[in-house]
Image (tube, rainbow, N blue to C red):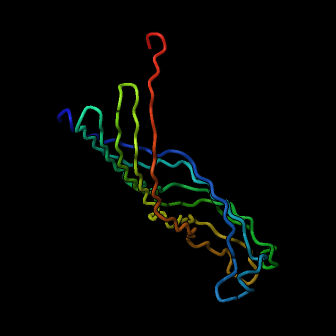
Amino acid sequence: PVDWFRIGAGFQLLVGTFTSTVVMNANPMDRLLAPPEDPAYDGLSRVSVSPIVAPSGNVGVTIVPETHVRIGVSGQLPTHVSAPATLEVKLPSAPVFNNAKQVGDQANVTFDLPPIFRAGVEVRPVDRLRIELAYVLEFWSVHQSIALTPNNLAIDGITGFPSPYKVNPITIPRDFQDSHSIRLGGELGMPVGGY
């Protein structure tokens, strides 16, 4: 709006794929079959999430109190990911799973990525040199878990259990914490010929 005050906003789109491999214990609660630490009840699962298409946005302001100084503040909104996934499970080696097999492999995965706050000061002591000091706060505490909701996914043939045995929603704990960082950078223009 004026030379010393600038404002901007942007639209972001996170696209891509995500793969995670997790070992989960298939032993029911309360030691129904065996102790929870028994590795014979550990199953290896691989979750492949694709495609991820998650929108977000950002906004920022720059204040120029003097020709050689710029102060900037910006914020980025959180990103909510909700995407289709394929779940492959290598069933545990315990005898009750000897005749078991996975039926279906489709699921939906949801998780949140953090909002981000940035603030910085840039000084330009001479025309060709810029030095910037910035502080960044990433709110990773919003990323507490990855939720996986199976779509008609079941395990068939588990000895002593109803068949098929429907797989319930799965939560993969993440328990991230916020991160703080201080960043220092510089830019130097070096003329080469007419450039």
Location of residue 24 in the rendering, given as x and y in whole percent from the top left corner? 67, 71
Residue 16 picture quarter: top right
Left or right of residue 97: residue 47 = left
Residues 13 and 100: in front is: 13
Left or right of residue 95: residue 86 = left
The answer to whether residue 29 is above or below residue 41 is: below
Question: Residue most toward the front?
Answer: 125
- Image point 62% across, 73% down: which residue? 166
Which image quarter is the C terminus in?
A: top left
Which image quarter is the N terminus in?
A: top left
Residues 162 and 175: in front is: 175
Location of residue 83 in the rendering, given as x and y in whole percent from the top left corner? 51, 54
Please give the count of numbered marks on the rendered protein: 0
- Image point 36% across, 46% down: which residue? 120
Left or right of residue 72: residue 173 = right
- Image point 57% across, 70% down: which residue? 170
Left or right of residue 132: residue 148 = right
Question: Residue most toward the top?
Answer: 193
Residues 159 and 59: in front is: 59
The answer to whether residue 97 is above or below residue 18 is: below
Question: Residue most toward the left?
Answer: 2
Residues 153 and 36: in front is: 36
Location of residue 118 in the rendering, given as x and y in whole percent from the top left corner? 37, 50
Location of residue 186 in the rendering, given as x and y in whole percent from the top left corner? 45, 35
